[in-house]
Amino acid sequence: MTELPNKLTAKLAKRQAGNALRKLPLPNGLIDFSSNDYLGFAQNETIFKNASSILEKRGITANGATGSRLLTGNKGLYGELEVLLADFFGSDSALVFNSGYDANIGFFSAVPQRTDIVFYDELSHASIRDGIGMGLAKSYKFKHNHLEVLGSHIDRVQERNVDSDIYVVTESVFSMDGDTPDLKSLAELCASKGVYLVVDEAHAVGVFGKRGEGLLNELALQDKVFARIVTFGKAMGCHGAAILGSHALKSYLVNFARSFIYTTGMPPHSLATILAACEHLPMSGGRQMQLRQNINFFKDQLKQHDLKPFFIPSNSAVHCCLVEGNEKVKKWSLRLQEKGYDVKPILSPTVPKGQERLRFCLHSFNTENEIEDVLLILANLFD
């Protein structure tokens, strides 16, 4: 077999030397404080059975889509799912993509044009950054959650580029910090300046909202944004994503989003699973309430163990403890795992050097005893 080129070998060696070489982990059977399965839907037998029932009732036995949606892959479940999603999230339309990554690169590479400007929060997800990088518009990052800075940037650009459309991009819950922007003020800012607001709700769906519709719905801001990206691989416990927006936006994406056009559609079972999860979510108020209780209990325990100064403030299911240095954070993660708790280290370059962290993901199925114990172990590591 042909050897890896020397330049690539050198890059691997450099990452190894920085104690940041990634490897695929195996299931470890530990108490889950690391997955995005916030409501336990990924293991929910009712959703599994209902997905199979959806296929059986419709007489669907196909294993694959057989082609892209623009050729042979646009099976009937797609239309049914997109109608359900638009209704559930309170949007004019929904367009399903194979993953959140596909949705973001499809949107940001296709929508902003050469003469346009994109402002994105400096902590935006890699898929957002990659999509922007694939597009033709100029882009600038703004300081994390600092709306005054963003407003000044917009003013300067509008003075110089009167014909440019401006897009502002953020997340309602940031995946590596767990914090949220002031979405009400951000929506007001964008409206007052006539710019387009795009919000990724990947880590808010299922966690916020009366029925789990996300933080924008909880704040009654769903009509104040140009586009929302929702994903099904977090609290929904399955796979895929959708872009929510106007009918015109959906038509545009069908025609110009390359990650939508040039890929095979999702298999029927994946679509049925999303349908089943969406139908189950409004009936899962107890799980959502338990998750909120666990989040509040976790925050109370941070105070009890004097850990609050080490954590990034968060009201979401994601809570991060800053532990500087790849070697140290990996060592602490291993200590927690040895005690039975699956808490993953987040290393640089995934996060900036010096901001390495332990990432705690909370779930409806975590118990108070587990939360109290894992934080006691962490507190002892600081001693």
Image: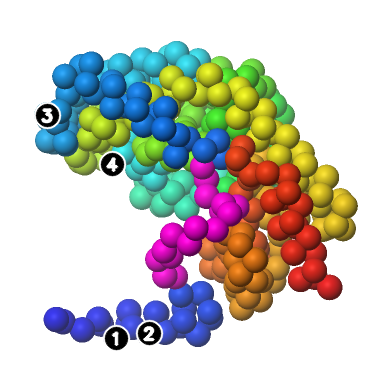
Query: Which numbered mark, 1 or 3, is in the foreground of this view?
Result: 3
Is 36 contained in the magenta span?
yes
Which mark identifies residue 6?
Answer: 1
**Which is nearer the eye, 260 or 63?**
63
Amino acid bearing label 4 = Ser
Q: Is residue 84 above or below residue 259?
A: above
Q: Which residue is mark 4?
A: 259
Structural distance between the alpha carbons of marks 2 and 4: 31 Å
In the rendered view, how is the structure colored?
rainbow
Structural distance between the alpha carbons of marks 1 and 3: 43 Å
Taking the image as shown, residue 291 lies to the left or right of residue 57, namely right
Secondary element under disc 2, as helix, strand or loop, is helix
Q: Position of residue 10 (x, y in %)?
A: 37, 85
Amino acid bearing label 1 = Asn
Name the residue rendered at 31%, 38% in the picture: 98
**Which is nearer the eye, 212 or 8?**
212
